[in-house]
Image (tube, helix red, strand yellow):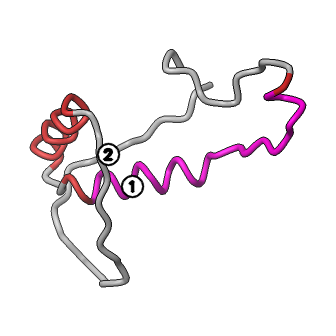
Amino acid sequence: MAKKFIVRHRDVMPKEDKSVTMSLRLDRSLQAEYDQLALKSGRSRNELMCRALRFAMDNLEFIDSPKATESGQDTTPSEQE
């Protein structure tokens, strides 16, 4: 069963500042999706992106095998998943 990235509407905003500022480039369509989710959830685009990054890191499987890339196996996640 596939894991889900669940977001609920935010009612309160507790915050502890342990953050750093970064910049990144992303497709406009992805930004638009985050804008829509931010409106729907009452959360900031930044918070949603941070949560998505945390989810990705917590569920990441890193394959450190030169044999996998040499044999032509794709070590990146499929966009169909």
Horizontal relation, residue 81 to residue 11: left or right:
right
Q: Secondary structure under badge 2?
A: loop
Label 2 sits on residue: 7
Over which residues does the magenta segment extend?
Answer: 47-69
Residue type highlighted by circle 1:
Arg
The circle drawn on residue 72 is none
Residue 23 location, x and y as percent?
29, 60
Residue type highlighted by circle 2:
Val
Horizontal relation, residue 47 to residue 18: left or right:
left
Residue in front for this viewpoint, 53 or 65: 65
Query: At x 17% / y 69%, what residue is drawn?
Result: 12
CB atoms of marks 1 and 2 within 8 Å: yes
Image vertical order of residue 20 relative to residue 38, above or below = below
Q: Secondary structure under badge 1?
A: helix
Q: Is residue 72 rendered magenta in the image?
A: no
Image vertical order of residue 38 relative to residue 76, above or below = below
Residue 56 location, x and y as percent?
53, 47
The crowd level at tag 1 (other Cα within 10 Å; few <14, some 14-19, many 20+) is: some
Residue in front for this viewpoint, 70 or 59: 70
The circle drawn on residue 51 is 1
Image vertical order of residue 22 relative to residue 19, above or below = above
**What secondary structure characterizes most of the magenta part?**
helix
